[in-house]
Image (tube, rainbow, N blue to C red):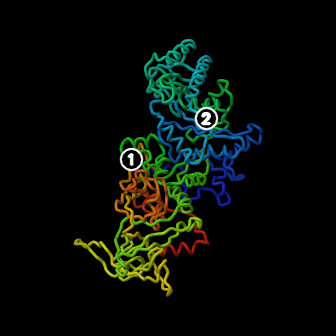
Amino acid sequence: MPNPGRMRDSRPNGPSPPEAADEGVRTVSADDANDKGGAETSGLDFIRTIIAEDLASGKHDKVVTRFPPEPNGYLHVGHAMAICLDFGVASEHPNSRCHLRFDDTNPSTEDTEYVDGIMEDVRWLGFDWGEHLHFTSDYFETLYGYAVSLIEQGKAFVDDQDADAIRAHQGSLTEPGTESPFRDRSIEENLDLFARMRAGEFADGEKVLRAKIDMAAPVVAMRDPILYRIQKKTHHRTGDAWCIYPMYDFAHGYSDALEGVTHSLCSLEFQDHRPLYDWFLDQVETPSRPRQIEFARLNVSHTITSKRALRRLVEGGHVRGWDDPRMPTLAAMRRRGYPAEGIRDFCRAAGVSKRDKLIELANLEFHVRQVLNKEVPRRMGVVDPLKIVIENYPEEQEEFLEAINNPEDDSAGKRRVPFGRELYIEREDFMEDPPKKFFRLAPGREVRLRAAYFVTCTDVVKDEAGEVVELRCTYDPATRGGDSPDGRKVKGTLHWVSARHAVDAEVREYETLFLDEEPDPDGEGGLEATLNPSSLSIRRAAKLEPAVAESGPGDRFQLERLGYYCIDPDSTPDALVLNRTATLRDTWAKVAKGGGAGGGKQGGPPPNPSKKNRQKKQKKEDA
């Protein structure tokens, strides 16, 4: 069920008004951002407004931000917003920088595989941290010293209660918590016990270090939070040097301060933790004083952005790994063929706000198409082939025709496409008894083959089951290149591949991984109940023009009239595998029918008037 507190935005260009399109952000003031969405100011979002004011007042002379992922999984589309914001605001000011800092404080779930994967994802998205690669584990000794200082001030104590007891005594939003029976231990005893925790004298879960703040605090995060817990696990960087590890809330602000971070940008769920962030910084002397600012997460329909839930899908065998092209991870999007620029444009258009909103998946695919349409070459391929034989074309003859590589880019030039007597067309481009508005191939009908000739279907060959297996056609040699010298018009234009020169391929077509608009990992039946059984379809008999075989893994192109595709790493020289990145036109209506979606331009902007006629003509030809 949709979250009633979340605002929907189905516009591909996001919430920005036309005059703010270059910023791609919601224009709100810092004062009004919290609940009302804010009033328009000078075109800056509320975070950039705060930063601009801090620089103008002299509070800071540069901006230092950080992106702090935990290396316990791969980054997803929600992280893309944080990356674009953290690195983006730093890049907008001189002498400023953004750090990549790994929050590696939980050795039971972390691995160097994820460290390497995260660094690859950030670089692929277009950002670089330079010499500022950091790990929270770099500061373990310093953080331990801060914890000792809190104990010496009487502001931290060692608790013998287990996690269940601590949770049970925490209270609620309306009831205060209950103080631990170990809260009044002496400073000397706490120092001794904490040192022995570090020395490994106690078992996992036997003791924790907690702050001593206020168990009746209205903010639950301030009710004597845990600072350190025992985990006798080997750390991916420090090995077995430590057996106690700091909690994120404790390590977060101090790590920011040690690195000279000026603005610590966090997602909205950390808003209630800001008093704790500030409390820790108030208790000990640190090299600098950062400021935490929260913004709304990027929520995309039919998508999960919880690493815990994504791990469940991977470990449960529901997908083929973290980079399965159906997953919302950046690694999966890269494998599927999404351009990094399209993801950045999507994040920019989504904007920065203080209010949660759900953005349609179609918005992301709109921006992906915008980039691919400009950049990728066109090729021809047939995913469900039907052979045609041109009976009046010489049997041994073949020729090479010129086809445009990219109509959006004149510099892309043209390519030579082989043509012969036997061709493949798309099976859905033929109907034996077509309805009135079907303009493609049918018995007795003439159509254009893209960049080739006019052909007319003269006969239909069927097998014993009555299925059409071959078409017999004739061609008009005078129409070479796709136009008729006598001026006659055809309403249909088909893509095709020469049978003699065709390259065999497997094509993987993707729909949404989940049927529900907002999948709930903890709902009835869990994630498994909302998985889309049609999220992957495999076409194993696709035929492609030879130029596709010159591509390598990661290369992208448009198969004319079909969609955008990418060469998958599973490909071999003898067996190409293609991933469909996105369809050409809107398939979003499938969502309403419960079939998931392969993407589309639902809610897209009105066509550019200068392109209207060309688009209308193209639709007619593709009908």
Give the residue displayed 54% in from the left and 41% down from the top: 119
* Left or right: 361 in relation to 321: right
* Left or right: 161 in relation to 386: right
Instruction: Find the distance from the CA under tag 1 to the CA under tag 2.
Output: 38 Å
Quadrant position of residue 577: bottom left
Q: Observer-nearest residue: 193 or 41?
A: 193
Q: Position of residue 476 (x, y in %)?
A: 42, 83
Q: Position of residue 57 (x, y in %)?
A: 77, 40
Q: Residues within 10 Å of mark 2 (few under 14, many from 20)?
A: many
* Amino acid type, callout 1: Arg
Q: Residue pushed farthest front?
A: 396
Dot in front, 1 or 2: 1
* Amino acid type, callout 2: Arg
- Label 1 belongs to which residue? 320
Q: Which secondary structure, mark 2?
A: helix
Q: Position of residue 270 (x, y in %)?
A: 57, 38
- Label 2 belongs to which residue? 274
Give the residue displayed 39% in from the left and 72% down from the top: 429
Q: Position of residue 342 (x, y in %)?
A: 56, 55
Q: Observer-nearest residue: 454 or 351?
A: 454
For residue 98, which numbered disc appears in the image?
Answer: none
Q: Are the two marked residues, 1 and 2, in contact with CB atoms closer than 8 angstroms?
A: no
Quadrant position of residue 102: top right
Question: Where is 66 relative to 143, above or below?
Answer: below
